[in-house]
Image (tube, helix red, strand yellow):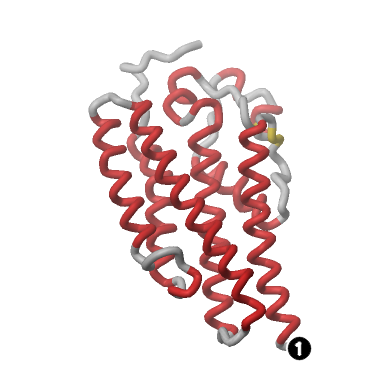
Amino acid sequence: MRRSEKSTPVSNQRHRAGAAALLAVGAAYLAVEDRIMIGPPWLALAVVAALLVPSGLARLRGHHDLARRVMLTATTIVTFTILGSAAILVRALPGGGTPAPVLLRDAALIWAANVAVFAVWYWEIDAGGLRRRHLEGYCGLDFVFPQCAAGAAASDEWTPRFVDYLFLSFNTSTALSPTDTLVLSARAKILMMVQSLISLAVLAVLAARAINTL
């Protein structure tokens, strides 16, 4: 049953979860070496901050669809930044010359950024986004969580939080699979393939460097 938008407003704290994750990724990139960056280190953080401001203003004025599109634009830009960094990291490996601690730090930051940004993707796309999930109740169109299989979601007693999508993203980057969550839609499957590819590339760089040091 559709909920009343006035009686059940979407929590601003929930909206801030995705924004905070993107800002954390931008801040993490300040510590990444310039050699694997596309542009200056502060660029990702500046772009995210610049886009989140109009997104927040649009949401406050009731333009929720516009706010969501701006949020997805910021997420897309950060995703391409991570893709570029992973590609540069892989391409630069044969040249060597990078101290092991620096390589480990950069790879860890890219891997963590990959987890965070794809958690935002899943958070934003599943069942039409946070606002629609809040107003209409949760119906898994892209993912089926274990709670849905147990029947809790059918009675509007459960809806996924950001931590659920973060856990899903973490599993995808570590196990290269969603583990306990079913993936239904084509867009979710494509996003997971991209995330797994980035994670696999970063892990391959670390494995190759470890072999070279033996």
Residue 36 higher or lower than 112, as above or below: below
Q: Residue at x 72, y 76 (%)?
A: 208
Q: Residue at x 58, y 18 (%)?
A: 155
Give the percent coordinates (x, y) of residue 115.
56, 54
> In which image quadrant can residue 90 be found?
bottom right
Q: Residue at x 24, y 35 (%)?
A: 57
Instruction: Determine whether the residue tagged by mark 1 lies in a helix, strand or loop.
Output: loop
Residue 103 higher or lower than 152, as above or below: below
Look at mark 1 in the image and give the residue it sits on.
214
Give the percent coordinates (x, y) of residue 132.
46, 23
Give the percent coordinates (x, y) of residue 177.
72, 48
Closer-to-camera residue (131/89): 89
Q: How many marks?
A: 1
For the residue carrying disc 1, how many other residues have a C-alpha within 10 Å: few (<14), some (14-19), or many (20+)?
A: few
Q: Amino acid at mark 1?
A: Leu
Give the percent coordinates (x, y) of residue 68.
39, 33
> In which image quadrant can residue 140 be found?
top right
